[in-house]
Amino acid sequence: MEDKAFLGGALLSLVGYVLYDAVKDLARSVSVPTRALVNSRQLGSYVSEAFRSRKVEISFLGYTGETLYNELYHRLEGLLDDPGLTRRVSVRMLVPDFAQPMTVPSRVGGSGEPVDDPDFRKRQERMCSDYDDVLSGLAAQITGNGRVTVVCEYRSYPGIPRDKICIFNRRQVLHGLYNVATRMRWQEQEFYDPKGYSTDLNVWSREGSASVEEAVTMWTKHFDDLWNLAAVPSWRRPAAI
């Protein structure tokens, strides 16, 4: 009986070692995901990480940029007291041309069709203009202190806000698609109005595989090309005489 018990224990140990080796082999064979999915509410950690660099470059393409604006404001404000390693900051915000008729944002028609609404477009334009004023004013204040140079620019693109893209120091790209069918009520009417804070974003990082590095390069070039083709927004244009 003792010999049989010993043999049984030895067999169990052998099976355990075999299973352990199999699990290790399986773990080695499973590649680490090259992309992660994050919510727009988590942008703060990416902004903070970007500001740990000497040269900070943040680029945005999307709707109004409200979720990113809030994070940028607090991080830029912190430079007034403690710039840390940061010596130069460049922020580029690419938003829709709200001066043009649009299908999104728009008023919801009787049959669900989009109806262009100049007043609602003007509301969104004022929001972007206010963000621009605050960030540009803060940039001038920080630059005036002489320790950090900050430049914040806005440009506009034609079309509807479909893609949301955030690029941090040309090393990380976050990309997602707005739900263009999202509705909201304003002045007792219903409007198509995408919500950036609820947009999930895929993350690409240059620390990933070769294919991920290519994706980062592609998205960065895509943004640069759009930026170079974009127009100065209406609120920054000189008033007609």
Image (cartoon, helix red, strand yellow):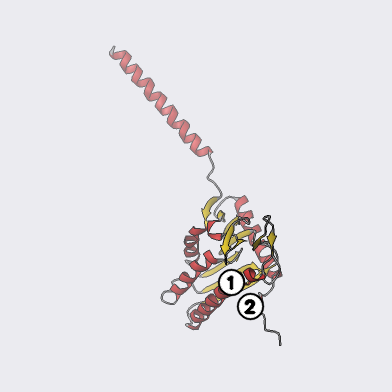
Q: Is residue 167 visible?
A: no
* Number of disc labels: 2
> Horizontally, is 101 left or right of 39 in the view?
right
* Picture quarter with the N terminus: top left
Give the vertical position of 192 relative to 87 (above or below).
above
- The residue pinned by badge 1 equals 128
When asked about the image quadrant of residue 158, the answer is bottom right
Residue 180 image position (x, y, % from top left)? 63, 57
- Name the foreground residue: 92 vs 33: 92
* Picture quarter with the C terminus: bottom right
> Horizontally, is 77 left or right of 1 in the view?
right
Q: Amino acid at mark 1?
A: Cys
- Name the foreground residue: 195 vs 228: 195
Q: Are marks 1 and 2 in contact (CB under 8 Å)?
A: yes
Marker disc for residue 235:
2
Q: What's the residue at 66%, 76% (across, down)? A: 234
Residue 142 image position (x, y, % from top left)? 49, 79
- Name the foreground residue: 169 vs 136: 136
Q: What's the residue at 60%, 71% (across, down)? A: 123
Residue 224 image position (x, y, % from top left)? 66, 66
